[in-house]
């Protein structure tokens, strides 16, 4: 079955990104071609190969594009995706910021330079990724036309995977909390600006560990299943303009809150 569009996932690792990508690419689920973005070229290629072999039918389109969160490198990655033959004739359906980034340091041991680098890596990266995704969605769907002009046509979905650190932070996690909260504000401001133009923007709060496994812990709600996260993101993408979720709390059943 030919893909019905494509997804871009940055933060494609074996712990959680793999399960999300598997759902998006599965012909009985998202049936999308998937562009995987992450820093390590070898690990990314191995992950793409593993995912292709794990999806039934043998026709899953999954391509790796090594990059970090530097804005210029992200721009090149999006350009490479646009030019790649696997995505020719397809439209971007969903773009997912799924980057893990943590920084813990006593306040007086932190430096302004390291603090700024942490913000640049995570928050500025989230901004640049979403900006490129939005540009692509507009280019593929007639520009910044409104839902009123297009009869309610959805142009795509941008998802930011956040954590509880976006809402509150702990001692020695100043840079981490600032970065996560900053990305949440990027998502909120973007949603208020572009929802009327048919771009659905979501910020999720993943409160608890995510694992790409079917285990006793995932079945009994100790840990989140990465595939369950993928199914939730697909459900968000399938929402029509009559009801759009902007922020969603994700947690396994046994996680305390």
Image (cartoon, grey):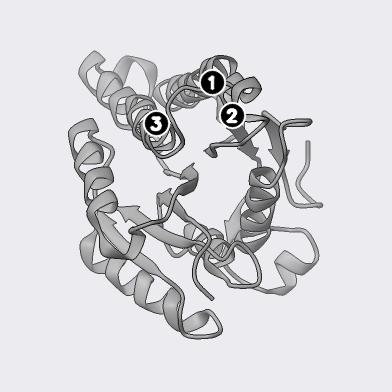
Q: Residue at x 48, y 44 (%)?
A: 96
Query: In the rendering, which numbered label is found on residue 126?
Result: 3
Crowdedness of circle 2 by 10 Å Cα count: few (<14), some, many (20+)? Answer: many
Q: Position of residue 2 (x, y in %)?
A: 49, 71
Direction from residue 234 to residue 38 in the image, left or right: left
Total count of labels: 3
Distance Cα–Cα, label 1 vs label 2: 7 Å
Quarter of the figure with the C terminus: top right
Q: Using the image as rendered, state which of residue 192 and residue 138 is in the foreground.
A: 138
Mark 3: which secondary structure? helix
Query: In the rendering, which numbered label is found on residue 194?
Result: 1
Q: Position of residue 49 (x, y in %)?
A: 35, 77
Crowdedness of circle 1 by 10 Å Cα count: few (<14), some, many (20+)? Answer: some
Q: Which residue is drawn at 22% across and 51% down?
A: 80
Q: Are marks 1 and 2 in contact (CB under 8 Å)?
A: yes
Distance Cα–Cα, label 2 vs label 3: 20 Å
Q: Do the residues labelled 2 and 3 touch (CB within 8 Å)?
A: no
Asked whether the viewer can see residue 108, the reply is: yes
Direction from residue 55 to residue 196 in the image, left or right: right
Mark 1: which secondary structure? helix
Mark 2: which secondary structure? loop
Q: Specify the quadrant of the image occupied by residue 72.
A: top left
Distance Cα–Cα, label 3 vs label 1: 16 Å
Direction from residue 58 to residue 199 in the image, left or right: right
Vertical arrangement, residue 191 with respect to residue 57, above or below: above
Q: Using the image as rendered, state which of residue 200 and residue 17 is in the foreground.
A: 200
Residue placed under numbered mark 2 in the picture: 198
Q: Position of residue 43 (x, y in %)?
A: 29, 67
Quarter of the figure with the N terminus: bottom right
Q: Position of residue 6 (x, y in %)?
A: 46, 55
Q: Specify the quadrant of the image occupied by residue 12.
A: bottom left
């Amino acid at each position: 079955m030919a893909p019905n569009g494509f997804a871009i996932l940055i933060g494609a690792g074996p712990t959680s990104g793999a399960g999300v990508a598997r759902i998006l690419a599965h012909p009985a689920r998202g049936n999308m071609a998937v562009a995987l973005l992450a820093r390590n070229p070898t690990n990314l290629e191995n992950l793409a190969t593993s995912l292709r072999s794990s999806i039934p039918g043998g026709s899953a389109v999954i391509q790796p594009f090594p990059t970090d969160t530097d804005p210029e490198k992200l721009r090149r990655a999006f350009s490479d995706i646009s030019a790649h033959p696997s995505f020719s004739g397809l439209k971007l359906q969903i773009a997912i910021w799924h980057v893990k980034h943590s920084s813990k340091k006593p306040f007086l041991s932190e430096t302004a330079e390291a603090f700024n680098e942490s913000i640049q890596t995570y928050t500025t990266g989230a901004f640049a990724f979403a900006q490129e995704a939005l540009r692509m969605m507009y280019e593929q769907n007639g520009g910044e036309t409104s839902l009123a002009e297009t009869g309610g046509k959805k142009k795509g979905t941008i998802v930011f995977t956040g954590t509880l650190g976006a809402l509150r932070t702990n001692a020695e996690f100043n840079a981490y909390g600032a970065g996560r909260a900053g990305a949440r504000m990027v998502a909120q401001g973007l949603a208020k600006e572009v929802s009327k133009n048919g771009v659905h923007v979501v910020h999720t709060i993943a409160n608890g560990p995510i694992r790409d496994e079917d285990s006793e812990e995932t079945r009994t709600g100790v840990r989140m299943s990465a595939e369950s996260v993928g199914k939730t993101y697909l459900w968000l993408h399938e929402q029509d303009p009559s009801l759009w979720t902007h922020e969603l709390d994700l947690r396994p059943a046994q996680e305390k809150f």
